[in-house]
Amino acid sequence: MVRRMSTPATAEAVTLEVEDGIARLTLNRPDVMNALDGEMGAALRRHAESLVGRDDVRVVLIASTGRMFCAGGKLDYVLGADDSGAAMQTLATDFHAAQQALASIDAPVVTVVQGTAAGGGFGLAISGDIVLAATSAKLTLAYTKAGLTPDGGATWLLTRIVGLRKATELTLLNTVLSAQDAADIGLVTRVVADDELAAAAEEVATQLAAGPLEAHGRARRLLQTALQHTLQEQLDAEAASIGAQAGGPEGQEGMKAFLDRRAPNFAGA
């Protein structure tokens, strides 16, 4: 069953479809390189927040139409506003609320990157738990080139993934990374031939959708908080998490399936 969620005002900007446990969140303004303006930011926020608490969503697939993943903020929209600063802050706030919502749910997030991911598109691209990039993809921050500073969680993500020194280089020099460059430093999970990207995304999404939703959520939270905890705090969190899973339906099903030498049915757990 497909559930399509959109309104006339935002249907062309962002679409959300849920089918077989896969939520497909798609940026759909290829004519402007999927650049973010107030309408798209609000739509992203609304759709992302609508996924919170839904037990029929087992994985989120973030993609875009056209040749470019996302060019970042739509600067002519910001400059055309009566108050550019307020317009940019509102856009960033909506964008960040969408990212926070996606980070809070149990369902893993897969981002599918083709063409260029710049500015806010960079942050959105690397925010996935799994990041798939076409061979021809390019990633760049590009903020300081426009006299701006990063948003989209880029500074939080970069310092954790590549370290402060490399994050500073990418931020201040606006380095353009190829897909392979990005994979080499851990920003991209897998580089896929351009004509195989969609199929690879479907394969990964299908695999994750068949997995244990609650275990995925607990694992995500352990990874998200690991750098904030002492070793003892993290060990305690891991012990509590694995105990909860072992005593719950997913753990029971998974362990029994392992001992029975059969595939687990987590969707029915």
Image (cartoon, grey):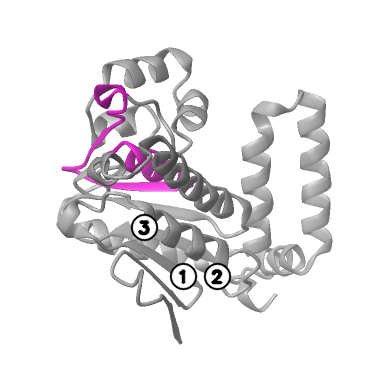
Q: Residue furthest front?
A: 82
Residue closest to the eye, 47 or 1: 47
- 92 is higher (above) or lower (below) than 58: above
Circle 2 SS class: loop
> Which of the marked residues, 2 or 3, is nearer the chain's N terminus?
3
- 133 is higher (above) or lower (below) than 231: below
Taking the magenta stretch, the answer to whether it contains residue 209 is: no
Residue closest to the eye, 111 or 263: 111
Give the residue drawn at x 81%, y 30%: 233
In the rendered view, does 208 fall on the left or right side of 121? right
- Residue 71 appears in view: yes
Which residue is label 3 attached to? 40
Specify the label residue 22 is tagged with.
1
Give the residue drawn at x 40%, y 40%: 88
Residue closest to the eye, 135 or 64: 64
Check whether the beta carbons of the residues at disc 2 and disc 1 lie within 8 A of each other. Answer: yes
Amino acid type, mark 2: Val
Which residue is label 2 attached to? 57
Residue 45 is situated, as x and y percent measured from the top left of the image, at 49, 57
Amino acid type, mark 3: Met
Residue 104 is situated, as x and y percent measured from the top left of the image, at 63, 52
> Which of the marked residues, 3 or 1, is nearer the chain's N terminus?
1
